[in-house]
Image: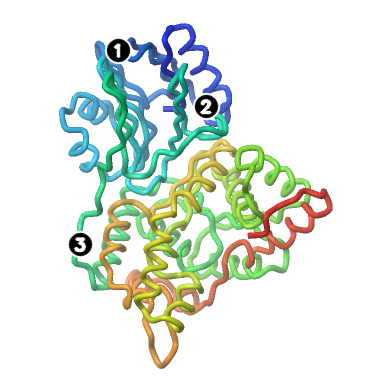
Amino acid sequence: MIGLAVAKRAEEARSIAESIAAAQRYRLTRPHRLIEIETVMGFACVAAREGEILEKSDRLIACAHYPPLDESRLEKLLESEDHVRSLRGLDQFFSGVIIDRESIMLFRDHVGHMPLGYAKTAKALTAALSRSALGPAAKTLEPGHMLILNSFGSKIIRWYDPAPWAMSSPRELAERLMSTAEKYLPDQVFLGFSGGLDSSILAHLAALLGRRVKGITVAMRGSLDYLWAREAADLLGIELEILEPHDAELAEAASLLLSHLPRAGLMDLSIGSIVLLAARRGRGMLVVGQGADELFGGYWRYEKAVLEGGIEAAAELMRRDVEMIHEKNLVRDELAAALAGSQLLAPYVAKSIYEVALSIDPSLKLRILDGRVIRKWILRKAAEILGIPMGILEKPKKAAQYSSGIQKRLGKILAEKKMGLRIV
């Protein structure tokens, strides 16, 4: 689903849906349709791309999804009498709407990889993949939730609760990483590549599975990423393209992001610009390592929390970060890729890995050895089992906005243009 409008008159609903789709023209990467259906709440008009909408008599489903759902799965979702159970049975990223004469149900995947915003006014209900297409009053449907509207009113319910796993072995994690990569990675993998552990695991898994892999590094000349990515690509045996953006490219990327994320600070604009510029080289899909740091304990602040407050303090910090990963990371990066005419794919937050990561004891993520905190310990051990070269396993890594040199350069560019930003 690209957009939805519900209004009293059919022509009004269609006009609003058309304007929502036009505001997201960067998402119209393939032909789309507008379909109207009459409900007890008014006329609903849905704009959706081919392969993402199915109409059956007096009901329809429109769902943006990855990996692809065939028509039979869409039909099963549409005709289900227990939508909670049906959504729980999917190991996919998705957001969408199911409409029949009596109700409208908006829904979103477990982690919020696919965006979904909505707005309700006295005149209409609207929804869209990009919240910015709906105006400043729009809200975000939280991950793992559904919004149900009918003649009695509206309610939001949570359909998703993580399934418990008993996971403590790096080998089990390695096997789960391999099986998830086999399901999610396309035949041609364009990979946002820094040479760090997370992107290197994805590159290595893709190569093991026989997929064609091309790493794309966005970095300033002389930066850590610029120097290290080439060495890491050689160790992994993958093709690499290094993009050193000039000032006009960075300024244009930041300006485009700001038009949709007006409250973004320098850090978000830096990371978003990296994703946007890489996605332009990605030919339809950019694979990224987002989510691994939150799920497996990769940030320096977790190490600091262990040293100052113990593993319980770090575990609480990780828990809060995982809960907000959609708002802090995925919405920004998905939008950046979409603005480049591409799609984002973050395999680490696929349900099959996400639920396993939540079940792992925090002491296996942040392991204290010889008085030193080893971040992402269990992920490093799994990577070792998978055959990642030791040079990559032992390489310290900084956050991409710093190691790429992009944040420093973009800050200077925006200062010269006198654009006020929150320095976050």
Write down the residue under mark 3. Answer: 165
In the image, what residue occupies the spot 57% across and 45% down? 279
Residue 298, which numbered label?
Answer: none
Residue 28, which numbered label?
Answer: 2
Label 1: which secondary element: loop
| Classed neighbour count for the residue bearing mark 1: other residues with Cα under 10 Å, few (<14), some (14–19), many (≥20) | some
In the image, what residue occupies the spot 24% across and 25% down? 78
Write down the residue under mark 1. Answer: 40
In the image, what residue occupies the spot 28% across and 69% down? 360
Q: Residue furthest bottom?
A: 370
Disc 2 marks a residue whose amino acid type is Leu
The Cα–Cα distance between marks 3 and 1, rounded to whole angstroms, is: 43 Å
To which quarter of the image does residue 379 belong? bottom left
Coordinates of residue 136 in the picture (x, y in percent): 57, 34
To which quarter of the image does residue 260 belong? top right
**Which comes sooner in the sequence, label 2 or label 3?**
2
Disc 1 marks a residue whose amino acid type is Val
